Image (cartoon, rainbow, N blue to C red):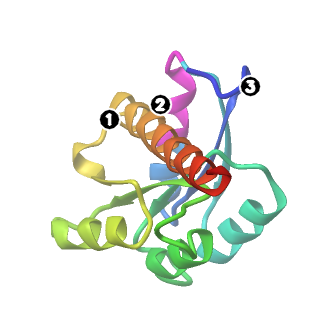
Amino acid sequence: MMIFGNPIRVLLIDGYHQDREYYSRELKASRRSYVILEAASGQSGIKLFLSHSIDCVIMEIELPDMSGFEVLTKLVPAVQHPQVAVVMLTRFGNSAFLDLAMKNGAQIGLRKGDTSGELLDSAIQTSIASVHSDQAVERAGTSA
């Protein structure tokens, strides 16, 4: 699925260079058309997000300059009405971090050790569809 016939624009925020490389390579190798921007820190990720049109943000919870949760609250200030899809990734084994991320605006939370490129591709599609669905419901509610 491509959004409105255009490539899917993904922002990958992760302080681990090898992880950014791996997921970027895996997504580009998928059957989808991805344009991937990469950021090594929360601040640089926020700057890229504000200066580009992004369909989905993939973000590590642990960032070198700030918590992924801090970035999440800046990207999704209204949890009930997200404007961008967010997939949180973590190296942490404790699922409580991912649960907390989803309560604070992420659509999906994944553990890196369990996440293939194919699974991440599916998570992106699901997250984008969820945000678009929420936006359609919101528009229908305001026009009624």
Packing grade of label 2 (10 A; few <14, some 14-19, many >=20) is some
* Residue 50 appearing in the image: yes
Tell me where residue 90 appears, x and y as whole percent.
32, 62
From this view, report whether residue 100 is shown above or below residue 139. below
Tell me where residue 3 appears, x and y as whole percent.
65, 28
Q: Secondary structure at mark 2?
A: helix
Instruction: Examine the image and state in which quarter residue 103 appears.
Output: bottom left
Give the residue type that dot 1 points to. Answer: Ser
Mark 2 vs 1: CB contact within 8 A: yes
Q: Is 25 contained in the magenta span?
A: yes
Tell me where residue 44 appears, x and y as whole percent.
70, 70
Q: Is 120 contained in the magenta span?
A: no
Instruction: Examine the image and state in which quarter residue 78 appears.
Output: bottom right
Q: CA distance from mark 2 to mark 1?
A: 8 Å
Q: Secondary structure at mark 3?
A: loop
Q: Earlier in the sequence, mark 2 or mark 3?
A: 3
Q: In terms of depth relative to the viewer, which is nearer, 132 or 74?
A: 132
Mark 2 vs 3: CB contact within 8 A: no
Q: In terms of depth relative to the viewer, which is nearer, 44 or 95?
A: 95
The residue sitting at the right extreme is 51
Residue behind mark 1: 116
From this view, report whether residue 82 is shown above or below residue 30. below
Instruction: Examine the image and state in which quarter residue 98 appears.
Output: bottom left
Q: Residue at x 39, y 38 (%)?
A: 120
Tell me where residue 36 appears, x and y as whole percent.
66, 41
Asked if residue 88 lies left or right of residue 140, the reply is: left
Q: Magenta span: helix, strand or loop, mainly?
A: helix
From this view, report whether residue 110 is shown above or below residue 126. below
Residue behind mark 2: 26
